[in-house]
Amino acid sequence: MDFNDSPAEAAYREKARAWLVEAAAAHRAEHGEPKPNTPEHMAAAKAWQASKAAAGYACITWPAAVGGGGGTPIESVIFGQEEGKAGVAYGYFTIGLGMCVPTVMAFSDTAAKKRFVSPAVKGQEIWCQLFSEPAGGSDVAALRTRAVRDGDEWVINGQKVWTTGAHYSDFGILLTRTDPDVPKHKGLTMFWIDMRDPAVECRPIHQMSGGREFNEVYFSDLRVKDSQRLGEVGQGWQVALVTLMNERLAVGGSAGPNYREVLELARALPGADGPALANDAFREKLADWFVASQGLKFTRFRTMTALSRGQTPGPESSIGKIISANQLQDLANTAVEMQGEYGILTGPEAAAGAAFQQSLMWAPGLRIAGGTDEILKNIIAERVLGLPGDVRVDKDVPFRDMPTGR
């Protein structure tokens, strides 16, 4: 592994950093620091995305012909690192540009690519991913939303849940069941849809953190043209795998308080025998978090090294989510418990601005998003370690004959 930038990479990093310093200052001067999840915050996010697109820093690895930067994967990583330091990154476009639009680019017709890719890169339109359903749990292929062909159109009825950003999205990619007479993975078909269609109803879910990022989405006789189909009829699972792999990689990079911030909190908090940092049990936990963080750090360096050499990263990229999501939950829980009765505070008066409280309420969702811990452990066991596959009794059963529990 080589942890240092090559001369070309160092030059790119310096160029990106210089642009970010100037652009971020101008952006803040115009938009200030708007409160998240407000119209002002959305407007600022779209303006920042447009600025990046104009400078060639939006979707760096995509071809310049569609509005991308025409750059390399390692340049994308470098810019992401520097943008994080600049503190002006927004999350509204992650799902669309990281998961949905790449699927559209891979499986749609030329007209759809021409229509959708460039506006998404520029931040003019936002996309969401409509996969999960109430009865399916972590089994995406168990979905029951039906699409029935009617001439050159499809009529869709059903429900999705836990759809991030559906309430502010313009378009979405939707996985449906088009053939219930074959096994569950074989009867699926993917479409892109207009989220503003009157046949689409979005109901935000109120989370315990106070946020409303997730949604229930209902389809009542939604009509879509066959030209909105992504991939072949019945090949939706193969299309979905492209999206799911991108999702797990994106979720694996989720941020939150780390062991350094817990260390600073422990130094300041009084305990029965001095600072909380003096507690042996806590110090043991701190050591575990440090070791895990270093392991993740160097595992990501392996991915970056592969990208720098023009290689495809190996299975190490699958590890990040399952480790980081569990560590974030444990770390946040410990930090809140250390604060005693003050741990119930969630406002700006709380320690670290309530970052630990927010992480405690958010971390369980990360262990579900993009595949549960159990799903990811199966993937790692079977596809990375080569262990025997899990028993799947419904593998060859027509979906229509699968028990519903009712």
Image (cartoon, rainbow, N blue to C red):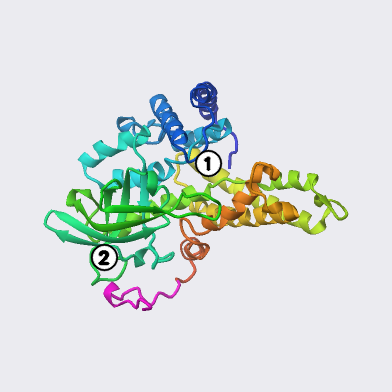
- The kind of residue tagged 2 is Gly
The quadrant holding residue 47 is: top left
Write the residue at 52% across / 52% down.
316
Quarter in which the N terminus is drawn: top right
Front-lying residue, 42 or 180: 42
Q: Secondary structure at mark 2?
A: loop
The quadrant holding residue 102 is: top left
The location of residue 267, given as percent across then percent down, is 79, 45
Q: Residue furthest right?
A: 273
- The kind of residue tagged 1 is Met
Front-lying residue, 48 or 377: 48
The reply, left or right, for residue 275 in relation to residue 209 is right
Quarter in which the C terminus is drawn: bottom left
> Mark 2 vs mark 1: which is more N-terminal?
2
Graded by Cα atoms within 10 Å as few (under 14), some (14 to 19) or many (20 or more), the crowding at tag 1 reads many
Q: Residue furthest left?
A: 151
The reply, left or right, for residue 42 in relation to residue 190 is right
Label of residue 304 in the image: 1
Write the residue at 46% across / 53% down.
248
Residue identifier under label 2:
187
The location of residue 390, given as percent across then percent down, is 45, 72
The quadrant holding residue 10 is: top right
Secondary structure mostly seen in the magenta stretch: loop
Front-lying residue, 178 or 292: 178
Residue range of the region highlighted in magenta in the rendering:
390-406
